[in-house]
Image (cartoon, grey):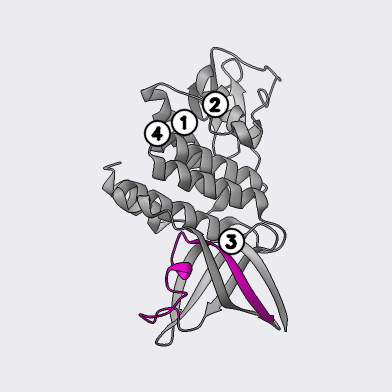
């Protein structure tokens, strides 16, 4: 048996038996792990909070063959303030669902974890527009997962920018206004700049941009359509979020 410690965020919770939880943990060094937490559903269990969705902890894990077992956990953050807003809670659930179903299980998860932790932090603080947070999360998650959209220039002629450019979310390509034949979504330069920022900016500046009210809707639409296209999945958590936001 191998024993080790890992900082991780619970992104999925399942149950088995009467008191056991199976948690999916996103860790920096070990990527995505599925671990059994025996007795965690018991009313007196020390692991109850540490094995809940959104719990960020220092986990003590035991690996036996291909099975991971949680032996102890020290809680760092539980993002309790998400519960103050139904919309924030629903969006956080979608973020975790998307991460659980998109992030490769092999390899390190450092950048994925940082993206998700920061997104949950801003949702708790409620100091950034949720449409912006959603667009940043979806587009950057796609990039980290290997789906980099071609946003540098027009895919046909190489033009860096025109007054209006067209983004094809199904091919991840840009076309300038001279090359398009009404393909894709028409975008003003400010939205193109925001998308380029999300894709290319260093992480410490990732969330540092602003867009006006109607342009945030356009950015959100582009990011969501592209993310759904490249992942080729349907997310009930996204449907629920959109339903409570009347989208």
Residue identified by numbered label 2:
194
| Secondary structure at numbered mark 1 | helix
Tell me whether circle 4 and circle 1 mark residues in contact (CB < 8 Å): no
Q: Tell me if mark 4 has few (under 14), some (14-19) or many (20+) residues whose alpha carbon lies within 10 angstroms of its own.
A: some
- Residue that label 1 marks: 219
Residue 1 visible? The answer is yes
**In the rendered structure, which disc, 2 or 1, sits on the residue that comes first in sequence?**
2
- Which is closer to the viewer, label 4 or label 1? 4
Which portion, as a residue range, is magenta? Answer: 40-63
Estimate how packed mark 3 is, as few (under 14), some (14 to 19) or many (20 or more) residues with alpha carbons within 10 Å: many
Is residue 23 inside the magenta stretch?
no
Membership of 56 in magenta stretch: yes
Q: Which residue lies at the image location 72% right of the left edge and 60% below the top edge?
A: 107
Residue 95: x and y in percent read 47, 51
Disc 2/disc 1 C-alpha distance (Å): 8 Å
Mark 4 or 1, nearer chain start = 4
Query: Which of pointers 2 and 4 lies earlier in the amino acid sequence?
Result: 4
Q: Position of residue 86 (x, y in %)?
A: 29, 50
**Rendered position, 172 above or below 1:** above
Q: CA distance from mark 1 to mark 3?
A: 30 Å
């Amino acid at each position: 048996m191998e024993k080790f410690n890992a900082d991780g965020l619970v992104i999925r919770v399942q149950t088995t038996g009467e008191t056991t939880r199976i948690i999916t943990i996103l860790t920096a060094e070990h990527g995505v792990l599925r671990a059994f937490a025996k007795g965690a559903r018991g009313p007196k269990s020390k692991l109850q909070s540490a094995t809940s969705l959104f719990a960020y902890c220092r986990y003590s894990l035991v690996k036996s063959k291909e099975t991971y077992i949680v032996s102890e956990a020290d809680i760092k953050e539980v993002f309790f303030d998400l519960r103050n807003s139904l919309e924030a809670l629903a969006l956080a659930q979608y973020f975790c669902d998307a991460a659980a179903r998109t992030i490769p299980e092999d390899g390190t998860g450092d950048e994925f974890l940082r993206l998700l932790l920061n997104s949950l932090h801003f949702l708790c603080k409620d100091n950034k527009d949720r449409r912006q947070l959603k667009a940043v999360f979806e587009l950057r998650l796609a990039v980290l997962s290997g789906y980099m959209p071609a946003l540098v220039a027009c895919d046909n002629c190489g033009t860096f920018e025109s007054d209006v450019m067209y983004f094809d979310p199904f091919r991840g390509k840009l076309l300038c206004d001279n090359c398009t034949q009404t393909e894709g979504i028409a975008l003003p330069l400010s939205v193109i700049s925001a998308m380029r920022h999300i894709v290319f900016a260093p992480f410490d500046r990732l969330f540092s941009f602003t867009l006006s009210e109607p342009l945030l809707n356009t950015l959100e639409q582009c990011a969501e359509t592209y993310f759904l296209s490249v992942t080729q999945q349907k997310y009930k958590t996204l449907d629920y979020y959109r339903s409570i936001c009347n989208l």
